[in-house]
Image (cartoon, rainbow, N blue to C red):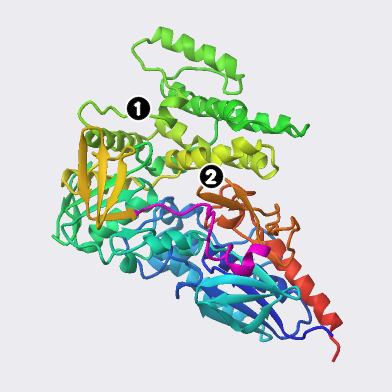
């Protein structure tokens, strides 16, 4: 006899969980008859639909890293949502009274995007079918147990009231849920492995202390602002191109960010919204590859083509600025010759290379701190120009990533080079192309001028933990640090103990691809079905977003279009429900 109570679970209810929920509600709405069902939403905090990153309680100074015009909750697939969903620009225009044209170009606080998510989540809950019960669970899912083709979730060490789920969408995203138990066990008030939410994770850091940050990217910038502006310090415009920071006395005395390369993330200015793709060498390469099943080595076969597009993006803009005429559709060998001829005519102009963008050599003659600060000042100046060839080159990966994704998700990269891409180039391209707004980098420079932000140890320092203190060391220099903060978003899963996916009986449901001694990646199909320990795809579970990164590339948190595994999950779940309902014996 088939069971009559149909339960659906979504584990991790940030934006991706919201998208899965919306597709499920829309698909159920199409059905003329459905039984009573319950949708269980699991989140570690009360920030349903927003997650940590878009929490509506966060301060205004935590900004998006791209303009409002790129933010939209509108689905790209059928069926239509049960209520009209407007873009963020349209929604914000109604809130502020500003024109949509103005709002398109603005960079909003992340909390505003959270309010936008909250509004439509609440409306979906309010308007959903009366036969649908929605239950929110504020808890951490630690284990998933299979029972007769259904799933029992364990939260806080115990089964969840014997609720058996028929279908499951897992969207854990960038949260502590995917960090390892081992990492969490090492955490104390002096070692912080994850910074969100700020109010909880950073409150132990004392004023006038010394802090080391692992990372010089978006999360590190959030952390730095949280420890300064978030502690009553403030920035003031002192001239057209400079901010000055005024201390509150509550911030740390010094913050030392560091990374492997020591190269900071590149900011984005308003001109990036006007850029268009001008070079198509990778696109042509991918189109030609569709006629065969050849696997490519990323570093020797694909990366050189990406570099061609980077160089071409620079020179297309550079030549246009200098009224130098050429055919933009020429082969790369011809473009190289034109570039050579141009520099022969103007030998005083430096020749641009993709290597200079991807692997910059910071001028550290006067120290690493000044070198990093000068690097950021250069990129602020370039972003303030109406048309900068450097900005065009830095933006090129954003146009190339969709074509690269074709190779990635169709397993057209060799196993070794796919791992190399994940471990090295994924972060590198994010540093170059997906940086914060210029405003935030102007704040970083002001903090450096105020003596709070110090890049002296930014390039691959040795990190030694002795009792409660940490020592950062570079050749001929070292310093004791009171707090060590991992200011990065976690990627990959612990080899031994990722909380959700490798606990107790969960090991039967998931399998991993080994990436290093520390990290593994979850195996799944292109549809997001996890592959279990026997090699079979589990059809009743779908992964969405970050957990799919072994198979699907670049899971942008807010994108509804990119790597959408939720739409088909919703359709399959409703088909499973319909079939189950037809089989019920009363």
The N terminus appears in which quarter of the rendering?
Answer: bottom right
Q: Residue at x 23, y 41 (%)?
A: 241
Numbered badge on residue 319: none
Q: Residue at x 58, y 70 (%)?
A: 143
Q: In the displayed structure, does residue 447 sit left or right of residue 51?
A: left
Range drawn in magenta: 486-508
Does the magenta run of residues contain 504?
A: yes
Element on which disc 2 rests: loop
Q: Is residue 301 above or below residue 23?
A: above
Q: Residues within 10 Å of mark 1 (few under 14, many from 20)?
A: some
**Residue placed under numbered mark 1 in the picture:** 361
Q: Is residue 83 visible?
A: no
The residue at the far front in this view is 467
Element on which disc 1 rests: loop
Residue 561 in picture, x, y percent from top left:
62, 54
Q: Nearer the viewer, mark 1 or mark 2?
A: 2
Corner quadrant of residue 113: bottom left
Residue 189 in picture, x, y percent from top left:
29, 64
Which of 366 and 178 lies nearest the eye of the viewer? 178
Residue 531 in picture, x, y percent from top left:
70, 57
Q: In the displayed structure, does residue 37 sit left or right of residue 124?
A: right
Does the magenta run of residues contain 241?
A: no
- Precedes in sequence: disc 1 or disc 2: 1
**Residue placed under numbered mark 2 in the picture:** 516
Which of 11 and 144 lies nearest the eye of the viewer? 144
For the residues marked 1 and 2, what is the alpha-carbon distance in whole angstroms?
28 Å
Q: Residue at x 60, y 32 (%)?
A: 298
Q: Is residue 47 above or below residue 501?
A: below
Q: Residues within 10 Å of mark 2 (few under 14, many from 20)?
A: few
Residue 235 in picture, x, y percent from top left:
20, 54
Look at the magenta stretch and give its main secondary structure.
loop
């Amino acid at each position: 006899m088939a069971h009559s109570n149909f339960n659906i679970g979504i584990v991790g209810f940030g934006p991706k969980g919201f998208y899965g929920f919306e597709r499920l509600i829309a698909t159920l709405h199409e059905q003329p008859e459905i039984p009573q069902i319950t949708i269980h939403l699991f989140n570690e905090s009360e920030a349903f639909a927003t997650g940590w990153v878009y929490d509506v309680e966060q301060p205004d100074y935590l900004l998006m890293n791209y303009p409002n015009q790129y933010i939209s909750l509108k689905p790209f697939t059928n069926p239509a949502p049960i209520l009209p969903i407007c873009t963020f620009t349209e929604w914000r225009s109604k809130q502020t009274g500003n024109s949509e044209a103005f709002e398109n170009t603005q960079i909003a606080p992340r909390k505003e995007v959270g309010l936008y998510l909250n509004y439509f989540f609440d409306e979906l809950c309010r308007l959903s079918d009366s036969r649908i019960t929605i239950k929110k669970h504020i808890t951490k899912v630690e284990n998933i147990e299979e029972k007769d083709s259904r799933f029992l979730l364990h939260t806080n060490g115990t089964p969840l009231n014997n609720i058996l789920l028929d279908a499951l969408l897992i969207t854990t995203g960038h949260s502590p849920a995917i960090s390892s138990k081992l990492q969490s066990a090492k955490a104390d008030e002096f070692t912080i492995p994850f910074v969100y939410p700020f109010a909880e994770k950073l409150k132990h850091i004392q004023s006038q202390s010394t802090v080391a940050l692992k990372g010089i990217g978006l999360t590190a910038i959030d952390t730095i602002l949280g420890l300064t502006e978030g502690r009553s310090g403030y920035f003031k415009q002192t001239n057209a191109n400079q901010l000055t920071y005024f201390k509150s006395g509550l911030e740390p005395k010094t913050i030392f960010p560091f990374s492997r390369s020591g190269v900071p993330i590149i900011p984005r200015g308003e001109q990036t919204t006007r850029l268009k793709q001008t070079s198509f060498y990778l696109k042509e390469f991918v189109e030609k590859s569709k006629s065969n099943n050849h696997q490519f080595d990323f570093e020797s076969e694909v990366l050189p083509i990406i570099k061609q597009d980077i160089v071409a993006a620079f020179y297309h803009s550079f030549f246009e600025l200098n009224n130098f005429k050429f055919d933009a559709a020429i082969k790369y060998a011809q473009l190289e010759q034109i570039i050579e001829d141009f520099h022969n005519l103007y030998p005083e102009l430096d020749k641009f290379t993709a290597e200079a963008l991807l692997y910059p050599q910071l001028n550290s003659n006067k120290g690493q701190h000044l070198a990093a600060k000068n690097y950021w000042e250069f990129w602020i100046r370039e972003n303030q120009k109406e048309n900068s060839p450097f900005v065009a080159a830095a933006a090129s990966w954003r146009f190339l990533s969709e074509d690269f994704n074709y190779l990635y998700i169709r397993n057209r990269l060799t196993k070794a080079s796919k791992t190399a891409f994940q471990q090295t180039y994924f972060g590198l391209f994010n540093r170059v192309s997906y940086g914060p707004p210029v405003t935030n980098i102007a704040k970083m420079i002001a903090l450096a001028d105020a003596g709070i932000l110090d890049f002296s140890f930014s390039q691959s320092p040795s990190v030694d933990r002795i009792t409660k203190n940490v020592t950062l060391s570079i050749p001929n220099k070292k310093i004791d640090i009171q707090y060590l903060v991992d200011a990065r978003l976690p990627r990959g899963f612990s080899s031994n103990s990722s909380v959700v996916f490798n606990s107790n009986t969960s090991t039967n449901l998931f399998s991993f691809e080994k990436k290093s001694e520390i990290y593994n990646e979850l195996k799944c199909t292109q549809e997001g079905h996890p592959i279990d320990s026997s090699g079979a795809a589990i059809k009743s579970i779908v992964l969405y977003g970050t957990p799919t990164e072994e198979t699907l590339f670049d899971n942008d948190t807010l994108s509804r279009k990119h790597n959408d595994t939720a739409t088909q999950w919703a359709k399959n779940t409703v088909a499973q429900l319909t079939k189950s309902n037809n089989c019920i014996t009363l």
